[in-house]
């Protein structure tokens, strides 16, 4: 296991904010790094591509390789066989990006002839194309941090709103600030001697009031009832 390749892959994914590495993304990234992607064919090439290959003496590489990177003082080129499938192109460009991102620049212009560098580029390719579930989730959250924050705020507002709504609805279900006992037929103010400190009381609901089964206490609510007898 190449820890340097793993670290470089992680840094690459973070730098370019990639939750998933696609062929299009790799093309854009490699181009942004100052490289030109040159697509070639073993049988027929555009005359400009043919002239470039001849001038750089890359006939042997073009003949046997699916892709490779060339870099000198004047040019930065990534050669890619045009007849490959999109999945194969993805693998090739990921490998070449491994060389680029891991700084595999030696005295020779064709990068990747060193065995150690090839291994590191292979490891880099594996890590960026086969992210763990944890890495994918973490990348998704990081990439969409602002969106996740907005969603979290909306959810919090909805929950608070629901709690307030339930509290208001519950408050509306009560009839004033009156209390009744489980066995009595009168309703009282909270501090009335007939309900204070008792454990079998509850706040009177609108439904209980409208049932007609209860009347006001003659002690704590004398003005609500002509009957001044006490009791609960």
Image: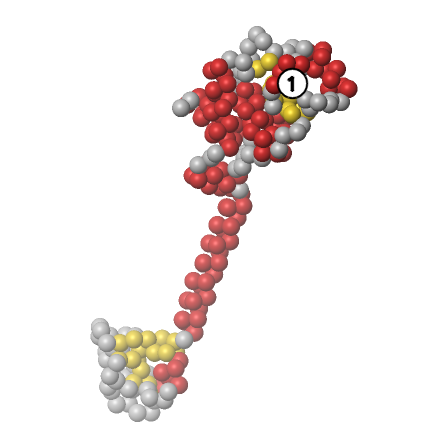
Q: Residue furthest front?
A: 43
- Image coordinates of residue 90 in percent, x first then y, are 58, 31
- Image coordinates of residue 226 in percent, x first then y, are 33, 92
The image quadrant where one finds the N terminus is top left
Nearer to the camera, 115 or 42: 42
Q: Residue at x 26, y 85 (%)?
A: 184
- Image coordinates of residue 51 in percent, x first then y, are 75, 15
Q: Residue at x 62, y 33 (%)?
A: 85
The image quadrant where one finds the C terminus is bottom left
Q: In the rendered view, tell whether residue 134 sits above or below residue 231.
A: above
Give the side of residue 53 with respect to residue 152, left or right. Answer: right
Residue with the mark numbered 1: 62
Give the side of residue 214 with respect to residue 41, left or right. Answer: left
Q: Residue at x 51, y 22 (%)?
A: 121
Q: In the rendered view, tell whether residue 185 sits above or below residue 102.
A: below
Q: Residue at x 50, y 18 (%)?
A: 118
Q: Residues within 10 Å of mark 1 (few under 14, many from 20)?
A: some
Is residue 18 among what the camera can see? yes
Nearer to the camera, 192 or 129: 129
Q: In the rendered view, tell whether residue 38 sits above or below residue 133.
A: above
Is residue 8 among what the camera can see? no
Nearer to the camera, 66 or 73: 66
């Amino acid at each position: 296991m190449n820890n340097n390749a793993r670290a470089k892959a992680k840094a690459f994914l973070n730098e370019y904010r990639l939750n998933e590495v696609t062929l299009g993304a790799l093309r854009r990234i490699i181009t942004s790094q100052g490289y030109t992607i040159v697509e070639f064919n073993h049988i027929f090439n555009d005359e400009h591509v043919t002239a470039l290959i001849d001038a750089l003496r890359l006939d042997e590489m073009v003949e046997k390789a699916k892709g490779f990177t060339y870099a000198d003082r004047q040019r930065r080129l990534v050669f890619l066989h045009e007849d490959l499938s999109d999945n194969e192109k993805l693998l090739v460009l990921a490998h070449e990006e491994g060389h680029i991102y891991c700084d595999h620049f030696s005295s020779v212009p064709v990068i990747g002839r060193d065995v150690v560098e090839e291994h590191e580029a292979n490891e880099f390719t594996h890590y960026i194309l086969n992210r763990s579930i944890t890495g994918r989730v973490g990348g998704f959250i990081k990439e969409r941090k602002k969106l996740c924050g907005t969603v979290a705020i909306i959810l919090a507002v909805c929950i608070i709103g629901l709690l307030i709504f339930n509290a208001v609805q519950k408050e509306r279900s009560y009839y004033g600030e009156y209390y009744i006992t489980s066995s009595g037929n009168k309703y009282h103010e909270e501090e009335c001697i007939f309900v204070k400190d008792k454990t079998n009381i509850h706040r009177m609901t609108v439904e209980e009031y409208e049932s007609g089964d209860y009347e006001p206490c003659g002690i704590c609510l004398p003005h609500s009832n002509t009957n001044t007898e006490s009791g609960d």
